[in-house]
Structure formats: C-alpha cells, structure tokens
Amino acid sequence: MLSSDEIETLIYEAIAALNSERDATDQIPATPETALFGVDAVTDSLSFVSLITDVETSLNVDHGLDISLADDRAMTRPISPYDTVATLRDYIVELLEDR
C-alpha cells in the first residue's frame, strides 16, 4: 500500500504536470493547503478534472490500484475530499484502507 507521503507526491506530480502547461505567473502551489475545489480553488474546472484524472491514472496504471476518485462516496460527503491537496490525500488513503 502507498503511504500518505507517496500519495501526496502523486498529487504534487499531477500539479507539476498542470504547471508545465501554465504561465510562470499562473502556477499552482504544491502544498497540503492548496485549494483544489470550491470558492478558493486555484484550479478551474478543466484543470481540476485533469488533476483528478492524472492522479487516478497514476494510481491505476503505475501502482496497479483500481481506485475511482469520482464516485458516489466522494460526492455525498459533508466535506468534499477535493477541497485541498491534504483532503484528497486523506481520501485516497481511506479508499486504500477500505480495500
């Protein structure tokens, strides 16, 4: 199983991929507090979908983990697992532990 730090690194790699396509003045910070979704988000809808897709693909292809990040479980939570890098990381850890 991947550690919390390894999962956070996967998310940062997805952010780096987004940043490689953005202007130097429009970079997404790679910190646990980075808002990914919601009012304070640093991503637009297309960037957000790309980030989630990249993380999910890495989990599935690179690590052999059949994990879906966009499911009913995520959508029905009172606090979105997509709010920040940290909440996304914690959600992925939870999904892996429940397997």
Image (cartoon, rainbow, N blue to C red):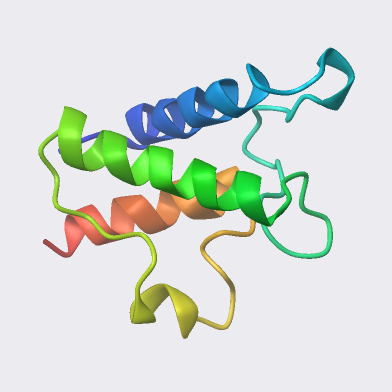
Q: Where residue 3 sits: x, y (%)?
A: 28, 34
Which quadrant of the figure has residue 60? top left
Left or right of 43? Residue 63 is left
Q: Where residue 74 sits: x, y (%)?
A: 42, 73
Is residue 84 among the parts visible in the rendering? no
Which quadrant of the figure has residue 98? bottom left
Is residue 14 among the parts visible in the rendering? yes
**Measuring 70% from the left and 41% from the top, which residue is drawn there?**
34
Quarter of the figure with the C terminus: bottom left
Q: 33 or 46, which lies in front?
A: 46
Left or right of 67? Residue 27 is right
**Measured along the vertical axis of the image, is residue 97 above or below residue 42?**
below
Q: 90 or 50, which lies in front?
A: 50
Q: Where residue 95 sits: x, y (%)?
A: 26, 60
Counting labels gives 0
Q: 81 or 50, which lies in front?
A: 50
Q: Where residue 36 sits: x, y (%)?
A: 66, 50
